[in-house]
Each structure stands twice: as C-alpha cells, then as structure tokens.
Amino acid sequence: MSLVVTNLGKHYGDVAVFHNVSLTVAAGEFVAIVGESGVGKSTLLNCMAGLDNWDRGSVLLDGQDLSRLNDDQKARLRREKTGFVFQAFHVLPHLDVAQNVALPLLLLGQHDELRVQAMLDAVGLSGLGQRLPQQLSGGQLQRVAIARALVHRPSLLLADEPTGNLDPGTAAKVMDALIEQSRQHGASLVLVTHSQAAAVRADRVLRLAADGLIAIPSMP
C-alpha cells in the first residue's frame, strides 16, 4: 500500500488552509507531521482519508484516486484500508471494550472474537474486554482506540494527536503500543502531533506550513 498526495490545496471560503502539499508514504513507513496550531494538520489527515474535500491536487490511496470515488466507495475503502486513532478516543460508552474493538470487523461483515482478543492482548488490555469505557483510564482508552484501528489489519493508520490528553509516561506507553502494532501489521503510519517526543520516533518528520510540507532533517 502507498499513499500519494500531490499538490493538494484546501480553502475555507476565501481563506487558504494550505496549498502545494505533496507527500508519498511507502508501505510500512512511519511519517510524523508537525506544525503550528491552525495550520491544517488535522484537515490534511482528513483529506488523506477522503473525509474532507480539497480544492486542487489529488490523493491516491492504494492506487485509487479518492476524488474519483463517490461517498459509498470512499467509505468502503476507508473500512478496508484505513484505521484511525484520535486524541478524543471516540469509544462508544454503551459498548464494552471488546465490542468497541470489534466494530471495524462488524462493518466489514466479519466476526472474529479470537482476533479481537489477540489485539487486546497485544496492546496490554488482557482481561479487560468486558469492562465499559468509563471503567478505564485515559491511557487504557487510547489503547482501545489503537486495537480498534488495527483489528481489521488496515494498510494505512492515521493518528491525530493520539497522546495529546495523556501525561508523558502514559503517552510514551501508548506510542510504544501504536508503533509496535503498526510495525507488526505492516501498516503505514501517518501521525499528526505537537509532541516532539512522539515525532522523533518517526522514520521521517515533516512540518506543515501554508505553502506545503517541509522535511525536518533530524530532531533533537
């Protein structure tokens, strides 16, 4: 799987969010995107997934041009090829942990309790499958989100500030789980973050500015 973004531009009315954004993410690569607040990092991530529209340029996911797909086709591609981890967790409070993790499989018409349990074990949530989200800590909830994002074995994992609500120690453990599991599953990982500690672990770090992405040779 590869993700290819070419000369992408996005406006809200007359206000330019970004333009001339180009990026190629190879299979299994971990790319971190940093930048000032309001520069459009989350919007760019949504464009990569086909969740948001853009004004010019193209996004190719696994060779498919997202702009040429209708809403149903884009939704199907997301279900099959992508996983999401967000800062706010987005777990469903009325479902237990195992049911939350199983959601991507159910959307694909699959039912695999063994795979769900294996993912819970892999992210350090063994024995917690029957608990409700309100019974978990913030770090545990983010691990639920990671397990859910990877349970259907996507080609591309998109993570938007996944450690933003966590203390440094918990954030490091969550990043360990995120990176280890994406590597194990061979998924490409695109991480949007303000955290230097998280970004420095990437294969490449890019800074988003109004006029595109700028490579950062190395981070201290």
Image (cartoon, rainbow, N blue to C red):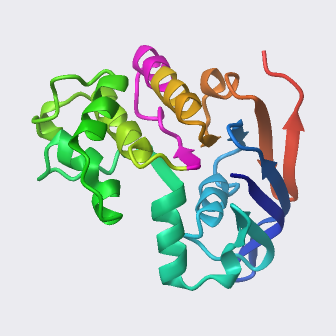
Residue 144, visible in the rendered structure: yes
Q: How many marks?
A: 0
Pick the residue in front: 140 or 189. Answer: 189
x 79%, y 61%: residue: 5
Please check the rendered image and state whether residue 159 is part of the magenta-colored stretch, yes or no. Answer: yes
Q: Position of residue 10 (x, y in %)?
A: 73, 72
x 81%, y 51%: residue: 24
x 87%, y 59%: residue: 211
Please check the rendered image and state whether residue 180 is part of the magenta-colored stretch, yes or no. Answer: no
Q: Is residue 195 left or right of residue 121?
A: right
Q: Is residue 199 left or right of residue 124?
A: right
Pick the residue in front: 183 or 138. Answer: 183
Looking at the picture, does residue 15 appear above or below residue 196?
A: below
Q: Is residue 156 left or right of residue 205?
A: left
Residue 138, visible in the rendered structure: no
Q: Position of residue 132 (x, y in %)?
A: 12, 40
Location of the C terminus by quadrant is top right
Quarter-of-image position of residue 130: top left
Pick the residue in front: 164 or 135. Answer: 135
Q: Position of residue 40 (x, y in %)?
A: 67, 58
Q: Is residue 183 left or right of residue 98?
A: right
x 26%, y 47%: residue: 112
Looking at the picture, does residue 184 appear above or below residue 63?
A: above
Q: Which residues are magenta?
A: 155-175
Quarter-of-image position of residue 53: bottom right
